[in-house]
Amino acid sequence: MSSTVLTESPVKQFNTTVYGFINDLKTIFGEHDKDIQTLHMACDMTKINVRLVLTPFQYYISNNPIFVKHMMDMNVDYFLAYDYTEMVKENEFSDDYNHKLIQKFREATTLHRHNPQTVESIFNWFKVMIYHAYRDEGKDPQKEMQRCQQIAVDNRATPTSSTTA
């Protein structure tokens, strides 16, 4: 690893990862896909507002231990069946960018569900984004992911709790 990567802030590393993931999605959808172009422009906007993508990601994804656990387990069924309504409804973070990003994640996973290498790549992008989101919050990513695993186990042991939250 270069020393530049080691000295970049977690938010910068997160945004670089999102940018890399969108470039990876170009290989699936093509660079002329309108949603990919919109996502690319939004990534450019992180130069003005570095938290444009990170804040909603932390709010809806990395701070959702059940969701994180399923991403760590590469649970495709959970990922595709998850109700993303809360993430994309009108709220303080609402913008078309978040909706397009989530839809492209799902669309890529659906299209390549039976291609283990592509699915693994998609989940690995998620894992790296979660890692940097935790670091930005001053959390130890490894401990936080273990905590998510434990919460998921505890939720399974409690019959009244929801495992899709």
Image: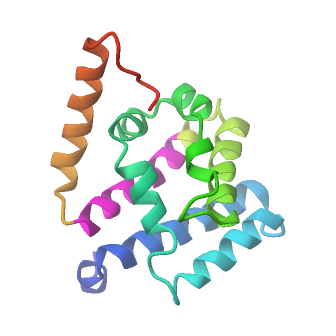
Exactly how many numbered labels are in the figure?
A: 0
Q: What residue is rendered at 31% in x and 79% in y?
A: 5
Q: Position of 65 compared to 116: left or right?
A: left
Q: Position of 150 compared to 126: left or right?
A: left
Q: Position of 90 compared to 92: left or right?
A: right
Quarter location, residue 148? top left
- Residue 115 x %, y %: 63, 35
Magenta-colored segment: predominant secondary structure = helix
The question of residue 129 being in magenta is answered with yes
- Residue 89 x %, y %: 64, 51
- Residue 72 x %, y %: 37, 38
Foreground residue among 104 and 3? 104
Q: What residue is rendered at 21% in x and 47% in y?
A: 144
In the rendered image, the quadrant that contains the N terminus is bottom left
Q: Is residue 21 above or below residue 41?
A: above
Chain part drawn in magenta:
120-137
The question of residue 39 being in magenta is answered with no
- Residue 53 x %, y %: 51, 68
In the rendered image, the quadrant that contains the C terminus is top left
Q: Position of 100 compared to 132: left or right?
A: right
Foreground residue among 14 and 57? 57
Q: Is residue 147 above or below residue 55?
A: above
